[in-house]
Amino acid sequence: MSALLRRGPADPAATLPRDLSLLGEAVELADGHLPAPAVEAVRALLGRAEERQNLAAGRTVVALLGATGSGKSSLFNALLGREVAKVAARRPTTHQPLAAVWGDDDAADLLDWLGVPERTVAGDGPDVPDGPGEPDGPGEPDGPDGPGGLVLLDLPDIDSTVADHRRVAGRMAGRVDVLVWVLDPQKYADGIVHDDFLAPMAAHADVTLVVLNQVDTLAADERAAVLADLARLLARDGLDGVEVLAVSAREGSGVPELRERITAVAEGRRAAQLRLAADVRTAATALARAAEADAAAAPVEVGDAAVARLVGAAAQAAGVDAVRYATRGSYVRAARRHVGWPPVRWVSRLRPDPLKRLHLGAQAEDVRLARTSLPGPTPVQEAAVRAAAHAMVASGTTHLPGQWRADVLEDVTARVPALVDSLDQRVAGAELEQTRRPAWWRVLGVLQWVFLLAAVAGAAWLGVLAALSYLRLPEPVTAMAGPLPWPTVLLGGGLAAGLLLALVGSVAARAGARRRARRVERRLRAAVDQTVREQVVGPLEEQLAEFSRFAGALAELAR
């Protein structure tokens, strides 16, 4: 987690447009996979960021926040230079946010968006100057020519006994540009302030200022001790770089310094961007925490071994082995019809073609309509496909958060029935070489007919000689082939050669059938592999790539 969100030296205000875009991409990718509250919180932030950038871009909203009795309203009046906010010693007096506006326009749209009903224009009251050459005294205003663009808010107490006051203060703390936390010597270590507000907003150090008010109630040594302890608490909260000012709204000490600091922030006109940049960092932290995984090196490809296992299980379910056996049988049957001994070739026609029995071999006009008569996958085979798909997801998604991983597994498992069904189409549409006729079939077929004709000629010749002998007619001189007469040679040689060629053709047919079956099997397994990758592996890798982009967006936000 920390490796994902470590900020680099880049100016957060300058990179704000990029950061908002990255955060938007991350939340879109995380939608539906991470807890809804975390996602909706980021969506709300993005909405607020867009609204804030479109409202009074030159304005800086500074809010005074604190617990009951911290003297926020007194400090507000001291900064403004006149009594505007009600002040009381014991009970909360700020029921609604009160705004003081410097500048030419009244910032109405901005204040409406913030939800601030009570407003006043700074400088309406009397501006009481000091003597010639003397600076403004404590509690006196900057006047109409003060920090143009500043909007100063006095908010209800964050620990108010009125729930609506706490709600308003919490909502405003999430919207204003600069947070000025007003603490007092009695409650500066209050857990509500530190645990519920300061520590969760540690990323907002660039737009946070801490004021220890009522320091006039402390002796010098006590003041130093309290400030040191406050600095320790702030460091524990992750705000060790935040500026701490000692102020007394009643006596005016420290007020000019605080006014000067606020004025400088307003004139810099970067506070709104810095606040939004801090919000982006906080939201990115929340997303990373919700992801519950370190995705710095998220893989986007599935391991070859897991894919091979799934392809093997899918091939079994698709009946690739049955097609291989049928291809071999079909080849032997067709070969015997061409190279077998002609008088008995007709016997092979009595045996059905194994491929045709499975409705294979004939190319369908529309592959989507192609179907085979292969038996469907057995429950064991289909379970093997699901198990292989589950194992592939399990091995490839170990870096994903629990719910995200479960979503991916559910998606892949839901694809298995469609995968099994489409495999039958791929097998039905595959090229099984059923129409191919090897050249040696023609050669052996011609030779078989030549030897058969020789045997028939020899038999006919011997028949003629036998008839002549039976009729006691003079026999012609029979040509001799060595010690044997030619008719006998033709008959015996033709029969022997034909039977020998039939035996050779049978052996060659079996060898050719094995070769064709292997080619068909490779082709079918390639088709199964392509189908598995298109329908299961591809979508899985797309989801892994989505998480990788999610992790990459968070990594960019961490730079």
Image: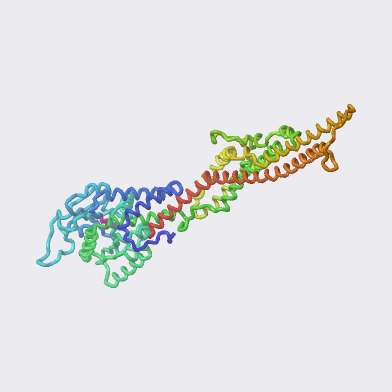
**Residue 241: quadrant of the picture:** bottom left
Residue found 27% across the figure and 71% down from its top? 219
58 or 36, nearer to the observer: 58
Q: Is residue 350 above or below residue 398?
A: above
Residue found 21% across the figure and 63% down from its top? 260
Position of the N terminus, as image quadrant, is bottom left
Q: Farthest residue in the bottom direction?
A: 221
Q: Is residue 517 above or below residue 366?
A: below
In the picture provided, is 417 more to the left or to the right than 511? left
409 or 502, nearer to the observer: 502
170 or 281, nearer to the observer: 281
Residue found 18% across the figure and 50% down from its top? 105
Image location of residue 89, percent across then percent down: 25, 58
The span shown in magenta is 61-65
Q: Is residue 63 magenta?
A: yes
Image location of residue 55, percent across then percent down: 25, 49
Q: Is residue 390 above or below residue 252?
A: above
Prevalent SS, magenta region:
strand
Q: Farthest residue in the top direction?
A: 471
Image location of residue 452, percent across then percent down: 76, 36
